[in-house]
Amino acid sequence: MTKTILLTGATDGIGLETAKRLAADGHELLLHGRSEDKLVAAKATVLKEAPSAVVKTLRADLSNLADVEALAKAVAAETTSLDVLINNAGVFKTPTPVTPEGFDVRFIVNLIAPYVLTRRLLPVMSGEGRIINLSSAAQAPVDLNALLGKRTLNDSDAYAQSKLAITMWSFDLAQGLGTDGPSVVAINPASFLGSKMVKEAYGSAGHDLGIGAEILQRAALSDDFAGITGRYFDNDRRQFGTPHPDALDNTKNKKLVQVIDEVITMLTASA
């Protein structure tokens, strides 16, 4: 059966490789990117390998909450039934690590944007839908003051904290949705894959991007992931595993979500 799939951060790296695989499987793709030129190029790349694929592109800067809201509206206008949401977009190193509102861009792009986007799109997702959130092997306890913009972090700490945060939120979301809502999984696609982000962060060519694309394809479509929710898949071990202990603490998860909502309120007020 053909599925409608939204994939953020689809213009390069794991996102683009995943898009090519999903298109080859015959699914309808909504590809997100920050640059219109890169979106045009990504669509051409996907269609070159899967000429009959249905591919639509959507531009948004995920560091800007207004863009995230507009992206959600654009997706809802494109489809009344979104089967899979892959929150893949992420940032590690950037020349502008702090947003104009004073928040760390890693928290905004890697956590707040998927949080807002997912919440806005839940009405067009059925209980059979799947939400796939990109985590990482790099997970570190979340400094809530840093999330609130009251403390500055270095690149590595900000990235690792944002990835634990999205894992914690994934567990909390799955618990809230229960068995009636879409399933939610957090995935470490594998360490040191050869994405632009890894090359910029570590100066390393990295491993084959296909390793990460293959697990995202499986998570989106395979029966192996059917009905599984509130779990963490560690692709370094090629199996479901145990995340950082904080993600298993319901009290910490709920406190994190409370702070996320505070940040969103502040961003909305400053818009």
Image (tube, rainbow, N blue to C red):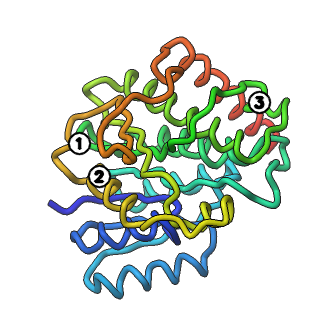
Tag of residue 196:
none
Whether residues under marks 1 and 2 lie with C-beta atoms below 8 angstroms apart, the answer is yes
Q: Earlier in the sequence, mark 3 or mark 2?
A: 3
Q: Which residue corresponds to the image point at 29% horizontal and 86% vertical from the top-left?
A: 51
At 36% from the left and 61% from the top, the residue drawn is: 211
Circle 1 SS class: helix
Residue 104 shown left or right of residue 237 in the figure: right
36 or 71, which lies in front?
36
Left or right, residue 140 beside residue 93: left
Q: Which one is earlier in the sequence, the residue at label 1 or at label 2?
A: 2
Q: CA distance from mark 3 to mark 2?
A: 32 Å
Residue at label 2? Answer: 220
Picture residue at 48% right of the left edge, 14% below the top:
250
Q: Identify which amino acid the numbered label 3 is placed on.
A: Leu
Quadrant of the frame with the N terminus: bottom left
Q: What amino acid does circle 1 point to?
A: Phe
Residue 248 is situated, as x and y percent measured from the top left of the image, at: 45, 19
Q: Name which residue lies at 71% across and 41% down.
A: 158
Classed neighbour count for the residue bearing mark 2: other residues with Cα under 10 Å, few (<14), some (14–19), many (≥20): many
Mark positioned earlier in the residue sequence (3 or 1): 3
Observer-side mark, 3 or 1, equals 1
Where is mark 3, residue-wise? 148
Q: Where residue 225 is drawn, which disc sits there? A: 1
Q: Position of residue 193 (x, y in %)?
A: 49, 61
Question: What is the C-alpha distance between the residues marked 1 and 2?
Answer: 8 Å
What is the C-alpha distance between the residues marked 3 and 1? 34 Å
**Of helix, strand and loop, which one carries label 2?**
helix
- The C terminus: image quadrant: top right
Q: Answer left or right for 23 relative to 167.
A: left
Callouts 3 and 1 close, C-beta under 8 Å: no
